[in-house]
């Protein structure tokens, strides 16, 4: 059952949390959103050997700003997956599948909900301490 979470109250409570802990909570919430997208991409990916599905990973992106970034994409450490872009965007003789693009586009609300639920869970846990 989906519950409605008051975003304004959630953000107000989050702002009251010490900055280092707030960043950890937001990092976890961002990863929870990425997990939703990853799961949908795995579901959408065509399966032959299973290598493509197994290569869809979440990766934390490092940058110089204070932004928290995760990406969902193909783990290129497996050379057998060099064809993923051809499945996503198609080739001259095959049409595109858009398994990654569709995963992102179709999970916006679900990913946002996962983000809010993670924050709420962590804040509730803090209150109980």
Image: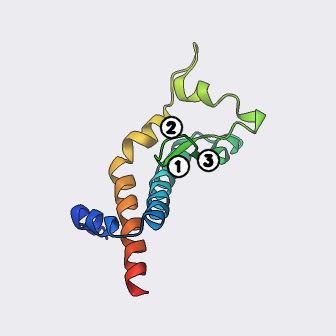
Q: Which quadrant holds the C terminus?
A: bottom left
Checking the image for residue 104, the label placed there is none
- Residue at 26% x, 66% y is 12
Verify CB contact (< 8 Å) between mark 1 and mark 3: yes
Q: Which of marks 2 and 1 is nearer the N terminus?
A: 1
Whole-angstrom CA distance, mark 3 to mark 2, is: 11 Å
Towards the viewer: 6 or 47: 6
Task: Answer few, some or many: residues within 10 Å of disc 3's Cα (few below 14, many 20 plus, some between 14 and 19).
Answer: some
Who's the residue at 60% across and 47% down the image? 59
Is 13 in front, or is 37? 13
Q: How is the image coloured?
A: rainbow
Query: Tag 2's secondary structure?
Result: helix
Q: Distance between the residues labelled 1 and 3?
A: 7 Å
- At numbered mark 1, what does the secondary structure look like: helix, strand or loop? helix
Q: In the shown orientation, is residue 91 left or right of residue 116?
A: right
Which structural element holds mark 3?
strand
CB within 8 Å, label 2 to label 1: no
Which residue is at the far right?
Answer: 79
For the residue pair 43 and 69, the one nearer the viewer reads as 69
Q: Which mark is residue 38?
A: 1
Q: Which residue is drawn at 77% across and 33% down?
A: 79
Q: Quadrant of the N terminus?
A: bottom left
Q: Residue shown at 53%/24% (left/top)?
A: 89
Residue 63 position, x and y percent, is 55, 40
User: Toward which corner of the image does residue 104 lie, by quadrant?
Assistant: top left
Q: Any mark on residue 100, and which?
A: 2
Vertical placement of residue 127 versus 41, above or below: below
Q: Is residue 128 left or right of residue 50?
A: left
Q: Mark 3 points at which residue?
A: 57
Estimate the x, y position of residue 4 in percent, counting from the top left: 24, 67
């Amino acid at each position: 059952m989906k519950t409605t979470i008051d975003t304004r109250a959630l953000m107000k409570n989050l702002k009251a949390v010490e900055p280092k802990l707030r960043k950890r909570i937001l990092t976890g919430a961002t990863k929870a959103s990425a997990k939703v997208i990853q799961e949908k991409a795995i579901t959408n990916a065509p399966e032959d050997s299973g290598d493509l599905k197994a290569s869809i990973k979440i990766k934390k992106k490092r940058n110089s700003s204070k932004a928290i970034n995760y990406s969902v994409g193909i783990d290129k450490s497996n050379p057998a997956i060099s064809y993923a872009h051809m499945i996503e965007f198609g080739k001259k003789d095959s049409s595109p599948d858009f398994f990654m693009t569709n995963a992102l586009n179709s999970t916006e609300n679900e990913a946002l909900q996962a983000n809010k639920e993670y924050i709420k869970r962590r804040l509730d846990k803090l209150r109980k301490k």
